[in-house]
Amino acid sequence: MSVQTRKVDAKCRVTLPEQFAGQVVAIQHVGESEVRVRIVKSPRRRPSLASLLAGVPDDYLPDEVVFGPPVGEELL
C-alpha cells in the first residue's frame, strides 16, 4: 500500500503523481493544508455463472450424445 502526504492549494486541489493513475484512492484530511492519499484495494467481484457461460463460444459446446432407450432399471 502506497501512502503519501501532499500539500493542497487554496481551493483544496491536489496534484497526484503518476503512480496513482487508474487506482482506487482514499483521501484523508490531515491538516489545514495537507491531505493523506493512499491506494486502497478495490473489492473483487465474483463473476456469476451466467456471465461465465456467456463467454463460451457456441462452437465450443459439444453435440448432444444419444445413448438409446433406457435398459434395465435406469428409468425410475
Image: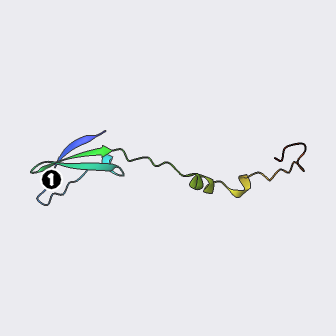
Please identify the quadrant where the N terminus is shown.
Answer: top left
Residue at figure coordinates x 13%, y 56% from the top left:
9
> Left of 67 or right of it: where is 25?
left
> Left of 44 or right of it: where is 49?
right
Q: Position of residue 8 (x, y in %)?
A: 15, 53
Q: Is residue 47 visible?
A: yes
> Left of 61 or right of it: where is 55?
left
Which is more toward the observer, 8 or 42?
42
Q: Secondary structure at mark 1?
A: loop
Q: Is residue 17 visible?
A: no
Residue at figure coordinates x 58%, y 51% from the top left:
49
Residue with the most extreme top position: 1
Q: Position of residue 42 (x, y in %)?
A: 38, 47
Residue 4: which quarter of the image? top left
> Left of 62 or right of it: where is 7?
left
Which is more toward the observer, 47 or 22?
47
Residue with the most extreme bottom position: 11
